[in-house]
Image (spheres, helix red, strand yellow):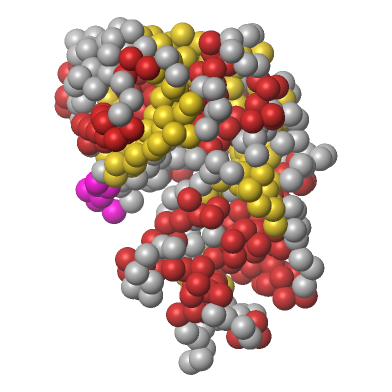
Amino acid sequence: MNYLLAIDQGTTGSTSLLIDIKTFKVVDKEKIDFPQLFPHPACVEHNLEDIWKSVSTSIETILKRSKISGKEILAIGITNQRETTCAYDKRGKPLYNAIVWQDRRTASFCDQHREEYQKSFQHKTGLPLDPYFSATKMRWLLDNVPAVKSAAYKDDLHLSTVDSFLLYRLTNGQSFATEASNASRTMLMDLETFHWDDGLLDFFGISKKFLPEIKESFTQFGLTSGCSFLPDGIPILSILGDQQAALFGQACVNVGDLKCTYGTGAFLLLNTGQEIIHSQTGLLTTAAYSHRGQKIYALEGAAYIAGAAVQWLRDNLKSIKSSLEVEMLASEVKDLTQMEHILFMPFFTGIGTPYWNSEAKAAIIGLTRGTENSHIARACLEGIAFSVNDSVSSFKKDFSHLNDIRVDGGASSNNLLMQFQANFSNKKILRPEIVDTTAYGVAMGAMVGRGEITVQDLAQHWKLENEFQPQSDAYYSKKKDLWDSTIKRLYY
């Protein structure tokens, strides 16, 4: 048994990675995309069978192409899009589409209860009362989907995040579990105890019997069973939500370590160790992982839109043919005086940290007759960097010391964006050799779960590929001031 299998179930597709346990190098990977469903305005869904098929197909493809037998897989790790909410029966049959983390259908419920409950809920969960999190989605499913109502009445219902659904399918229904990094995103878990909270369950009207068991992050979750694409008996030893998996894969295991993952959105996590830090600046407090009785916490900043803004340029404006072209197009801008008043506000699904304005809309402002596609492309990249920097600024106010920012995810390969990030945040940006850090993180977690390595051993396996030093320039400070004043004028 020479390989680890990491399953990275993301918002737009599912990726499988094979990692050699001797060298800790990625042997091969395969991503399978699946459809995004938009049944109504502000609603985003995934078909759970599409998700399952994308996972199974990615595993089948990678094993066939690499000519590696499933019997050579030592262990499996699972990482997943976090707040996305699933309802299925005890046979694993979906009862409704998964409601995706981006979905805003429960905004009115949150608005109705926010003033009365926000403060107490946030202290207990680290989260604001917002449609982003799973509890309101579960409540909506119970209230509005007849199949879910019926299953609840018959005690034949599972409500969970995607990790538990995949675990349930992979183990043929033998294991229904999750862990703290995912459970902490439901708004149903007490941060101090890492247990489901009875008061929160009562408020949202959700029975604990419908929810998975909360385990530690690196432990025996179950054994594969009944899968056509994998042999029975492979242990699943690690589960982490995608952003926490990236934190772990970036070897951010010391207090003050910070990472940013650039995917559909951009998400930053700061390791705060065993201390719960309640942000005064709009950051989330969340579980990072739990291991051998230790609870490790993090502060989190969220920008809902990052790579999706570049996709919008490609698909809607059609100014580029592929996302990779945006860097070259933005680099065509030589005269920065033409950029001084152009701002791209990438708030297609509202603003996350630190403003939490779910009604915010995207905008491009400051255009002139001389504005060209290259200016808009550069403004788009700047807008992503600005959104991320809003979280970095909050980290600086809430926490005494921040280490360099470690970056990963698809858009981290954009050198121009990374340089903008260094300039606007005034922090060194470190990009590792392995940017599939989410999947890599749970693969390493599986080795921790086996007892082969310790958490502190991760640092020796992290390798730097490139770094971006902040550059001081009047343009960047003036543009940052313009961004801040515009945000406050339009959205806050």
Using the rendered image of the protein, determine whether residue 260 is visible from the camera's viewpoint: no
What residue is shown at x 45% (from left), y 19% (from top)? Answer: 2
| Residue 451 picture location, percent across and down | 59, 10
Q: How many marks?
A: 0
Residue 455 magenta-highlighted: no
Left or right? Give the position of 466 relative to 78.
right
Main structural element of the magenta stretch: helix, strand or loop?
loop
Residue that sits furthest to the front in the current view? 67
Vertical comparison of 182 with 328: above or below: above
Using the rendered image of the protein, determine whether residue 16 is visible from the camera's viewpoint: yes
Left or right? Give the position of 93 relative to 384.
left
Vertical comparison of 71 with 272: above or below: above
* Viewer-proximal residue among 197 and 430: 430
* Viewer-proximal residue among 283 and 153: 283
Vertical comparison of 10 with 329: above or below: above
| Residue 492 picture location, percent across and down | 59, 59
> Which quarter of the figure has residue 10?
top left
> Which quarter of the figure has residue 337?
bottom right
Which span of residues is magenta-colored?
35-41
